[in-house]
Amino acid sequence: MREKKREEYDVVIIGGGASGLTAGIYAGRARLKTLIIEKALVGGLATYTNEIENYPGFPEGSSGLGLMELFKKQAEKFGVKFKLTDVKSVDLNGEKKTVETFRNIFEAKSVIVASGGRPRITRAKNEENFLFDKGISFCATCDAAANTDKTVMVIGSGDAAIEEGMFLSKFAEKVIVSVIHDEGKMDCNEIARDQALGNPKMEFKWNTMVDSFEGEEHLDTVVLKNLKTGELDPVKVDTCFEFIGYEPNTEIFKGILNMSKQGYVITNEEMETGIPGVFACGDVREKNLKQVATAVGDGAVAGVNAEKYIAEEEVFENQIMQKEKVGLIYIYSAIDAPSRELLPIMKDIEKEFEDEVKLNVIDLYKGKSLCDRLSCDIDPMTIFYTLNGEVSAVSTDCSVPAVKKQLKELVAEKAAANA
């Protein structure tokens, strides 16, 4: 079997939707060698939306495909490369991370997971013929205006389905809701249920599920099946909205990234996953609102922090953990007076040892990620001593005699090793 080709990048982004493209724009603009891997269509689910009217800067609206093409063009302007293939496996531990596809192994200093998700579908007959722009939609916010004065169907009775159904009723002439439960029973909260039942534009088909979708080029009929009688009920509609859940594309990350019960990647506000250098953004994240605008915000944060991580990694390896001299790393807090007062003292100690000791000073708060790499989660006024690029000792005794004693021992040890 032919050996897979290896390629090195600064940043590899898994997923080419709105968040992945935005992360790529930021990483590319920071002059990082960046690769976006997308298994389907660059632009993700947004490309299937006919009209996006709520993305800032486009008062006349834009097609999802047109907007995503602009994103891609901007990423390419900053040198971002694209590979249209599926990711088979990842190894995200260590300084060098790997992303493996069918033909290649991509090595990266930082990886951004932007693999998005997919709407859960009914799997009824002919469904695949009408997905997205052919009559089946998964986003009321995106497609409500296009259904003004039309008849639409909503599949589902959870909070999302009923709330989106009520939103659609502001535009559509009629909203028909297919519910699998007995009359009056829904999966949404009681307030939403009561509001929906009282909405004159909403009609409910109880004890039903979709049997098939029918139409020529575009959906025009949803055939519902009564779960109690088996009777088929063909319903004429202009669009069918499915709100029966959402599935994140996180199968290859199970057991690797921290996830919610539903399989979404859990991050903090910095898009950090908990693995150094690995970030997640967009719809693959555990969050409430999934829109192009929120995906862009996520991607910007992930791209900036990937660049910051790589820059700090270089500082950490080449300066903080340098091998040429004995290292004196002083952790302090700018808001703590006693620890600030030690700064000139530490500099004087470095001068006393002339060219044998290298001092690095890290603010406990501003340099938090550097402190994390040192596994420093203690109070300021902490000293790390290094020898040959490795931590040799850690101490909270910052008195001059104690520091000098430790440094003399390490300088002597280094000299003996080089003799």
Image (spheres, rainbow, N blue to C red):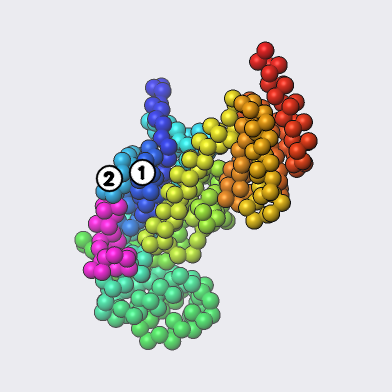
Label 2 amino acid? Lys
Residue 335 falls left or right of residue 233: right
- Label 1 with label 2: CB-CB less than 8 Å: yes
Q: Residue at x 39, y 57 (%)?
A: 296
What residue did someone put label 2 on? Answer: 77
The answer to whether residue 313 is seen in the rendering is yes
Magenta part of the protein: which range?
49-71
Residue pushed farthest left? 217
Q: Residue at x 74, y 32 (%)?
A: 404
Residue 42 location (% of width, % of height):
31, 48
Q: Residue at x 51, y 54 (%)?
A: 270
What residue did someone put label 1 on? Answer: 28
Q: Quadrant of residue 3?
A: top left
Label of residue 119 in the image: none
Q: Is residue 144 part of the magenta span, yes or no? A: no
Viewer-proximal residue among 147 and 38: 38
